[in-house]
Image (cartoon, helix red, strand yellow):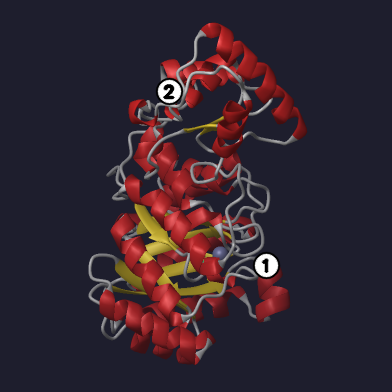
């Protein structure tokens, strides 16, 4: 089995479905080009039947994106499929992504269909898509709450009909990592024609387990992970692209997988999405949050300034940030303060540093952090301190 993980980005589709994240065509186009630069193998551009706007956007993205596959989502209904096929008309690498629910609860209350009818609809949809494009993905919505025997049956049938990717969504974010891993292993072992398709996973984050579940699936045979920038998506979101990719990159000593993502484009992608949607990233968000590479505690600052590997498992540069951030606050020590002051052009002896430190800790007690301008103002108020030497500013920080 090859060890390359296909990164399927659904920021523009599932991500956009989260409240407050809707984007217009121009914004989606801008992001799609950034996702292509990021190295997403597949960009799910939208759900063409949803609106005329979504249809036109998928069409335009298909026209401009050249290196990534462009996917259009549709249910198994003929009108949905026709719209998706039409929207992909100009795409260099088109993929139709069709789905229908497979769990008993969805069959009974949402679809009001019997299992045989669901298999028939799925097969017909895949056959139709296949008659237009080679690349066809089939998703069994709510797969993690579906009967595994039924999943084996429907996936076998759609692969037979021409599906090249079968997707196993944890639609409601219910699965536990070991359970989800077992399900993927079972599918990999029991679907007789699985050698003709790639197993994909699509995990939601309702229990905060989307990334863990995705990685567990990879360990058990999945080779496509569906994810979004900043982890946005329905309800609690989807597996976060940056977390999946950086887990793989950072822990190569444990998991021998590759992705095509240019990790240096992670931070720019995250920032572009935040800017376009007007929704900031939570400060403690892994990889891309404001604090992901920030250090305030004195012991940590001391370590990081001596050697970043003491408290950083990846470099900020590897995800597209220029450097880590030393934050002066009430937990900071003299060492970090001295370094910070050097960066600002103040070179103090031990005694002067002690005086400034006392002053800074007072300010830090009153306000949450001490910014560069606070330090400069503190220095200007301290008598008999050496003058600032901006020309000699220390680098980094
Ligand atoms: O969560 C889900 O099941 C989906 C499918 C349409 C893939 O988004
Ligand atoms: Zn989803």
Q: In which quarter of the image is residue 369?
A: top right
- Vertical position of residue 212 compared to residue 357: above or below: below
Residue 300, can we see it?
yes
Count all numbered tags in the image, as a single digit: 2
Q: In which quarter of the image is the N terminus?
A: top left
Which structural element holds mark 1? helix
Q: Which of marks 2 and 1 is in front?
A: 2
Vertical placement of residue 336 versus 162, above or below: above
Location of residue 71 (image quadrant): bottom left
Q: Mark 2 points at which residue?
A: 308
Tag 1 residue: 104
Q: Is residue 91 left or right of residue 210?
A: left
Residue 219 in percent (x, y) is at: 43, 39
Q: Nearer the viewer, residue 397 or 236?
A: 397
Quick check: 314 left or right of 288?
left
Q: Is residue 257 left or right of residue 385?
A: left
- Tell me if I can see residue 153 in this picture: no
**In this orientation, which residue lies closer to the viewer: 254 or 392?**
392
Residue furthest to the top in view is: 351
Q: Could you tell me which residue is drawn at 35 percent across and 39 percent down?
A: 318
Quarter of the image for the C terminus: give it: top left
Query: In which image quadrant can residue 3 be found?
Result: top left
């Amino acid at each position: 089995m090859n060890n390359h993980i296909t990164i399927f980005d659904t920021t523009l589709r599932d991500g956009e479905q989260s409240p407050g994240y809707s984007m217009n065509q121009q914004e989606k186009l801008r992001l799609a080009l950034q996702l292509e630069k990021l190295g997403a193998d597949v960009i799910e551009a939208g759900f063409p039947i949803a609106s005329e706007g979504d249809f036109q956007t998928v069409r335009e993205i298909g026209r401009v994106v050249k290196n990534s596959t462009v996917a259009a989502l549709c249910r198994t209904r003929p009108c949905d499929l026709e719209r998706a096929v039409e929207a992909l008309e100009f795409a260099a690498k088109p993929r139709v992504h069709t789905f229908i629910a497979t769990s008993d609860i969805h069959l009974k209350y949402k679809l009001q269909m019997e299992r045989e009818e669901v298999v028939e609809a799925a097969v017909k949809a895949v056959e139709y898509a296949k008659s237009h494009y080679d690349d066809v993905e089939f998703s069994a919505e709510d797969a993690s709450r579906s009967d595994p025997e039924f999943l084996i049956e429907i996936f076998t049938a759609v692969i037979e009909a021409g599906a090249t990717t079968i997707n196993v969504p944890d639609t409601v974010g219910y699965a536990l990592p070991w359970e989800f891993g077992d399900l993927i292993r079972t599918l990999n072992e029991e679907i007789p024609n699985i050698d003709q398709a790639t197993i994909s996973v699509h995990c939601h984050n309702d229990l905060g387990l989307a990334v863990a579940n995705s990685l567990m699936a990879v360990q058990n045979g999945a080779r496509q992970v569906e994810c979004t920038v900043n982890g946005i998506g329905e309800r609690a979101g989807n597996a976060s692209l940056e977390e999946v990719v950086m887990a793989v990159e950072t822990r190569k000593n444990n998991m021998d997988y590759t992705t095509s993502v240019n990790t240096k484009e992670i931070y720019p992608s995250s920032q572009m999405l935040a800017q376009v949607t007007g929704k900031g990233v939570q400060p403690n968000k892994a990889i891309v949050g404001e604090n992901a590479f920030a250090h305030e505690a004195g012991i940590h600052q001391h370590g990081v300034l001596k050697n970043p590997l003491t408290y950083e498992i990846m470099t900020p540069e590897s995800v597209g940030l220029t450097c880590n951030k030393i934050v002066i606050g009430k937990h900071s020590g003299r060492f970090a303060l001295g370094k910070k002051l050097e960066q600002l052009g103040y070179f103090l002896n031990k005694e002067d540093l002690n005086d400034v430190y006392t002053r800074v800790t007072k300010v830090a007690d009153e306000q949450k952090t001490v910014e560069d301008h606070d330090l400069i103002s503190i220095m200007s108020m301290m008598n008999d301190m050496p003058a600032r030497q901006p020309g000699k500013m220390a680098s980094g920080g």
